[in-house]
Structure formats: structure tokens, C-alpha cells
Image: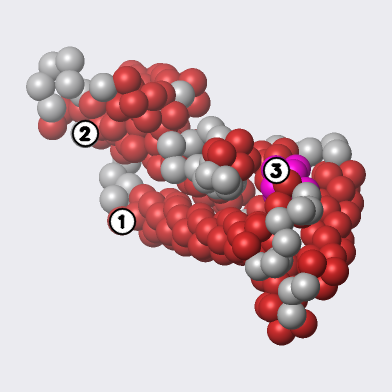
Amino acid sequence: MKRIFRSFSLIINYKTFIITALSVISTYVCFRLGLTAKFPDMLVGVAIVFPVVFSIGSAYTRRETALQRFADFKGHVIAVYYATRDWPGSKNHDLPGRVKQIIFEMMNLMREMFKDNNDPKWKEHETKIYHLFSQLSSLTMELREQGVQSGEISRISQYVSKIIIAFDNMKIIHNYRTPVTLRAYSKVFIYIFPIIYGPYFASTVGDYSASLEYVMPVLYSFILVSLDNIQDHLENPFDDIGEDDITIDAQETIEHLV
């Protein structure tokens, strides 16, 4: 039940109530002034609902792709850890512990980078994480001194390459999102539509029982603003705000590396 209320609080917020209040006021003023009009209902679907649903679908697809890339990242860093732990003939070395520390630092940096859309330390974090990639690559070369064959070292180097590719894919998903112009278009119409449709809502007042004449502007406002809020929460799948966000938990990953 607590989770359900939290989900509602994410899609119904202060913007919902502001737009709803404005649409009700617009309907009331138009009704009192006799300003009525029969606007086509299909305009709502063509001008607003279709672009918003398209944006939500696009954002959800990006989230699913980000999940796959994050799984690739985790799978390959864990494979590198197991290789440094199991492949050397001698166990008198600290390679697994050093790899584990690098994994921990990389995942913490990724979480900080992707969480904030306007992270002022983005360049600094990015430099650090590429330095950690370099450390990981150099560290795998030390396996040669532990008797690991060149073919197996080549395989680990491929793992490191795939780790970097997975990170860059997640970075691109974070930086390049739904077209800005489409989002701006959708927001403008979502926020002004319930207000400019006041004459239409006023024309339907006689179709409803007393005290129900404002149901339509309230419903339209709640539906449209809620759709916009859903899209906003899906836009960045790493910000730890929405219910469907991707959680990068370095500590949990490290606890499984024994």
C-alpha cells in the first residue's frame, strides 16, 4: 500500500493541482460570460496524447536498453574479478582485492555521474572513471606474471573492452534523450490545453448533473499532467526518483564477490 501511494505521489504533484485549478477557473469564467464552443475531441489525441505517448514509449525503450547495458557492465566486471581470482596458478597475490576496489569505485562514480542531469563534476568524474579503466587494463597484464596464458589474457582484455563499451552506451543514453523540441511542444500544449478548452468545457455544463459540471476539466487536467509526469520520470533512468529507475548499487555488487 505504501508503494502505491508513493507511485501516485510521483505522477500527481503540485503541477497537477495548479493546472486543474486553472482549467476549472477557465471553465467557470467562460460559463459565466457565455463563451462556449464545440472544439473537436480528436484534437486532444492528435495534438497532445499521441506525442506524449510516443515520448513515453521512446523513454521506456531507452530505459530497457540501459538495463541491458548495465547488465553487460556488471557481467563483465564480475568475469574479470573471477578471472583474477581463479586463473593464476599461485594465490599469493592481491589482484582480486584490487579488482574489487576498482569495481567499487567505478560503480560509485557511475552513480554520481548519471544521477544528476547537470552534474558540475561530470568531466572530473569521467576522467576518473577512464583512469580506473586504464588501471583495470594494466592490472590484467599482471596476470602474465602469475602464469596465465596469453590466450586467457586476451580474453580478459576483451572483457575490459566490453566494460568500456557498456559504460559508453549508458553515458550516451544519459546524455541523448527524447528530442528537446518534442518535449517542449508537448509541455506547452499539456499546460495550456485545459485552460484554452474552457469554452468547450463550458458548453458541456448542461450535459451533467449539478455539481458534476467540472468533472471534465478536472479529468482532462489530471490525465494530461500525469502522462507528462510519467514521461519526466522515465526520461533519466538513473536519477533514483521514479519507480522504474535503474539502481547502481556498488556495495551490493561487491558483497557478492567472495
Q: Are marks 1 and 3 in contact (CB under 8 Å)?
A: no
Q: Nearer the viewer, residue 73 or 61?
A: 73
Residue 197 visible in image? no
Reading the image, the residue beneath label 3 is 104
Label 2 – label 1 distance at C-alpha = 16 Å
Q: How many other residues sit within 10 Å of disc 3, few (<14), some (14-19) or many (≥20)?
A: some
Is 171 positioned to the left or the right of 232 in the image?
A: right
Q: How many other residues sit within 10 Å of disc 2, few (<14), some (14-19) or many (≥20)?
A: some
Q: Nearer the viewer, residue 109 or 253?
A: 253
Q: Amino acid at mark 1?
A: Met
- Which sits earlier in the primary sequence, circle 3 or circle 2? 3
**Position in image of residue 91 (x %, y %):** 71, 56
Label 3 – label 2 distance at C-alpha = 60 Å
Q: Which residues are magenta?
A: 98-105
Reading the image, the residue beneath label 1 is 42
Secondary element type, mark 1: helix
Q: Residue at x 89, y 44 (%)?
A: 124
Secondary element type, mark 3: helix
Q: Residue at x 61, y 36 (%)?
A: 251
